[in-house]
Image (tube, coloured by chain):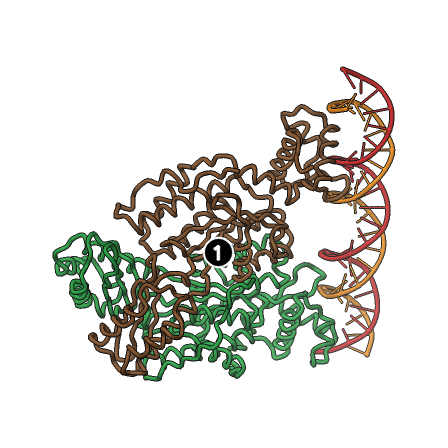
Chain colours: A brown, B green, C orange, D red
Amino acid sequence: MDELSERQMQILQAIILNYLETAEPVGSRTISRRSPLGLSSATIRNEMADLEELGFIQQPHTSAGRIPSSKGYRLYVDSLLQSQRVPDEADSRVLRAMLKNKTHQLDSVLKEIGELLSVMTRYPTVVTMPRLNRTKLKHLQLIPLDEKSAILMIVTDGNIVRNHVIKVARPISADEGDRLTKVLNKHLQGLAMEEINLPIIQKLRHDLGSDQEIVSGLLDAIQATVEYADDVEMYTAGTTNILDFPEFNDISSARAVMEVFHRKDEMLAAIRGTQTAGGRNLRITIGSENELAAMQDCSVITTTYTVGGNNIGSISVIGPVRMDYGKVISTLGNMISDFQNMLETENSPDRPPDSGGDSPPDPPGTD
Amino acid sequence: MDELSERQMQILQAIILNYLETAEPVGSRTISRRSPLGLSSATIRNEMADLEELGFIQQPHTSAGRIPSSKGYRLYVDSLLQSQRVPDEADSRVLRAMLKNKTHQLDSVLKEIGELLSVMTRYPTVVTMPRLNRTKLKHLQLIPLDEKSAILMIVTDGNIVRNHVIKVARPISADEGDRLTKVLNKHLQGLAMEEINLPIIQKLRHDLGSDQEIVSGLLDAIQATVEYADDVEMYTAGTTNILDFPEFNDISSARAVMEVFHRKDEMLAAIRGTQTAGGRNLRITIGSENELAAMQDCSVITTTYTVGGNNIGSISVIGPVRMDYGKVISTLGNMISDFQNMLETENSPDRPPDSGGDSPPDPPGTD
DNA sequence: TGTTAGCACTCTTCCTCGTTGAGTGCTAAC
DNA sequence: GTTAGCACTCAACGAGGAAGAGTGCTAACA
């Protein structure tokens, strides 16, 4: 019942390919002419009726051609995922050139990746910064600035840096800054953000000692960072690309989709909700598989990266359901492995960060 | 010739007010009925013919009512600007509450202001961060991080902080870090970014001395900051609000305008191109006064703020030409003066940093 | 039994065309 | 200077009809 015959698969595939191209319902005659099956339109019609009954395609109205359903796309995409991905050398080169020129600021690199990806695929993209709350604190430093302010700098694993300007009641001397820096590091270094709790803060407050006004400013800044770490930073790029597609040709749907793109919480939920595909670091949600009503006409392809072990962020491409899955899967797959490569050569061994990333870390999915 | 009679002014105003409300061409009968002038539609028609000849209103087609031209709006707006602005206490309170909760990070405050403004006015907003290239360097610090990296922190006037993670060929000791920090500050402190030139760099390189590999990493980071300072950071908020308005009801214009909103260079040009209105810190560009073709159906209202003297950024509201100028002018005007106030009390006299972190602004997505 | 030709039928899309109504400009009267 | 009246214009709307794409079904064929 769930098994399709070889011929049905071919017809389904033909319908999907044609529909991806034209955005118009596909008729039996078109398939009959275009596909190498050599069957008459009448035969195709019979098969189509079966495919429709099985839920793989649907008819917008009687006497129109067929369009793939989410279930149909799903089958298509899953079979696509099994095929071997071919690294695109041109794309890779563009990315590497970009990465090379960048200073090693993770957030700006990620922004660029989002932009690049949206230019390469012509779809909107969303990238999220690594979540900081599971990240270990690597270094803290208090830097006296002038009579009334100082900076608390917090560096986490993966060299992500956060600053807080603190107002201080009286000037802090360089020596005092060093002393406070030492105490801070002694208590907090190596802890994950989410491990910082009240008892630790209490002990810290005690050890920091004397000047309550300065100490509470410090603690406030730390607390702000910890709270902020729960938040996820997100960047979108190329959102207007979605308006290229005829399925968003009417204002109301265009509006709805643009609004979702800019609403952070919903966007994050949509990305997080993507289903894990067996084995590979690629999650795909197709059309009605999206929970969000406004996203039912979109598909989301998401991949994740890790920095310094376990704190992860994501890179997603969003397109109409009728998107070019093959292209996006390979482009995104190549990009993420290049990027992850960079992160790793960057963060551990001491090799010049130039090494050509030839083999992607994740082998093609089995099952 | 350029002088309008009192009656003409009243009619023009009536046309504009009606059009702002309905977005439909205004007929003579409407004015005759609605306005307190007590004139028949025929008389209004005669006056309208004159106003049209003078260029203040126009007809979309024969036998339609009149709509204001950019020239008409300009007259209206200029007269509006002369009237006294009434501070809106409610708005002010919202802003102050927001500013209070924020830590003193200029960029996040500005982002919030943009969001807030777009919620309050229901129009898209654009804020730009202060340009750094005229900003004086206040402090530099080199912080050794681990065996392979260090952080160069650069603080400018107005306490804007930039970090660069630098890869180093060998570990830097704390003492060496301090020494390099001292040299950096000696040469660069007090300079404006744009004043950093080759001779200064050369002297700096000489004084930094010994280890060429480390020094060149440092210099690269400084150069990157200087280059970056030329760039302007920009945030947009509420862009989809523009789609509420019937003038962007067709996809092509909606698309065009959304695209401009996300194209940084064009957006900055549009903001910079706004004309200065006499005396006040408010610049308004109306419809066809915009250079950019895609912006001819929009009006831009811009105001500027200054941080630490002369480095300035801007806050803009963008709406359809048919926007509620009165409301935006007063909202934006109030907001900028509150904000500027905050910046000044922040940067000179000493008040304790009022910490009131009770509720984070946006909780991450649930479930 | 699977495949195909033929045919009647269903819908959408597009064009045309008349109607309606808002609004104008002009003229003549007040 | 103001107003009533009237002929005229033009966009918007909807009905009606033709065109065309595509279907399902039936009957014939290999």
Residue type of the residue flagged with mark 1: Thr
Residue A179's x, y, as percent?
A: 23, 74
Whether residue A71 sits left or right of residue A240 in the image: it is right
Residue at horizontal 25 percent and vertical 70 percent from the top: A182
Instruction: Specify the quadrant that holds the N terminus of chain B.
Output: bottom right
B207 relative to B190 in the view: left or right: left
Q: Residue B105: where, in percent of width, then height?
A: 38, 71
Determine the residue positioned at 51% across, 72% down. B116
Q: Give the quadrant of residue A35.
A: top right
Name which residue lies at 40% across and 38% down.
Answer: A90
Chain containing the residue with disc 1: A
The picture places residue A51, in percent across and down from the top left corner, at 70, 37
* Residue found 32% across the figure and 54% down from its top: A104
Q: Secondary structure at mark 1?
A: strand
Q: Is residue A337 left or right of residue B203?
A: right
Camera sees residue A117:
yes
Q: From the image, tell me which residue sits under label 1.
A: A236
Q: Residues within 10 Å of mark 1 (few under 14, many from 20)?
A: many
Q: Nearer the viewer, residue A279 or B173?
A: A279
